[in-house]
Image: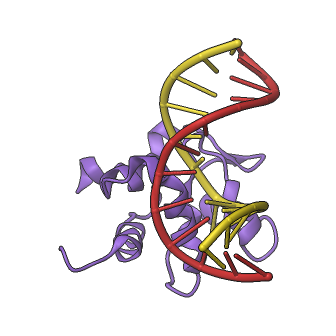
Chain colours: A purple, B yellow, C red
Amino acid sequence: MANEGFFEKVYQVAALIPYGRVTSYGAIANYLGASGSARMVGWAMNGSVKKELPAHRVVNRNGLLTGKHHFQGTNLMQQLLESEGIEVVENKIQNFEKHFWDPMKEL
DNA sequence: TTAGTGACTGGTC
DNA sequence: CGACCAGCCACTA
């Protein structure tokens, strides 16, 4: 687990997010040891679709679907989250702490 | 090469 | 408690 670069690790963690769970960019960045570089996690997610990553399970620390704009349009991200049993209202996850998945804690 | 931008976060006012 | 500022690193023009 030392060959991967920053992006590879981001992809790895994102791919490990279990069904019905969500995490934040900061959590991933912190797990990678780059807590101050949460933006890079978001930038890495730029190729999430190509990497087939469940980017819809990754939101900012507020549980807000900040990146939903990068999805196919509009409510696709919210739709996916709701399909997994996650309550989403106005692009915001309800009970975020309850659905939160911490890579540092789970991994 | 320099400058600008961005799927973020934490602290301060 | 809502809004603003600064730090962070990679990529594009």
Q: Quadrant of residue A28?
A: bottom left
The residue depicted at 25 percent of the width and 47 percent of the height is A105
**Quadrant of the frame with the C terminus of chain A:** bottom left
**Where is residue A77 drawn, in percent x and y?**
68, 65
| Residue A84 showing in the rendered view | no
Residue most extreme to the left: A1
Q: How many marks?
A: 0
The residue depicted at 32 percent of the width and 75 percent of the height is A5
The residue depicted at 57 percent of the width and 80 percent of the height is A47
**Where is residue A99 drawn, in percent x and y?**
47, 46
**Where is residue A66 drawn, in percent x and y?**
69, 54
Image height check: is A45 above or below A22? below
Q: Quadrant of residue C6?
A: top right
**Where is residue A37 drawn, in percent x and y?**
47, 53
Q: Nearer the viewer, residue A68 or A96?
A: A68
Taking the image as shown, residue A8 lies to the left or right of residue A87, namely left
Taking the image as shown, residue C13 lies to the left or right of residue A82, namely right
| Residue A5 showing in the rendered view | yes
**Quadrant of the frame with the N terminus of chain A:** bottom left
Taking the image as shown, residue A73 lies to the left or right of residue A93, namely right
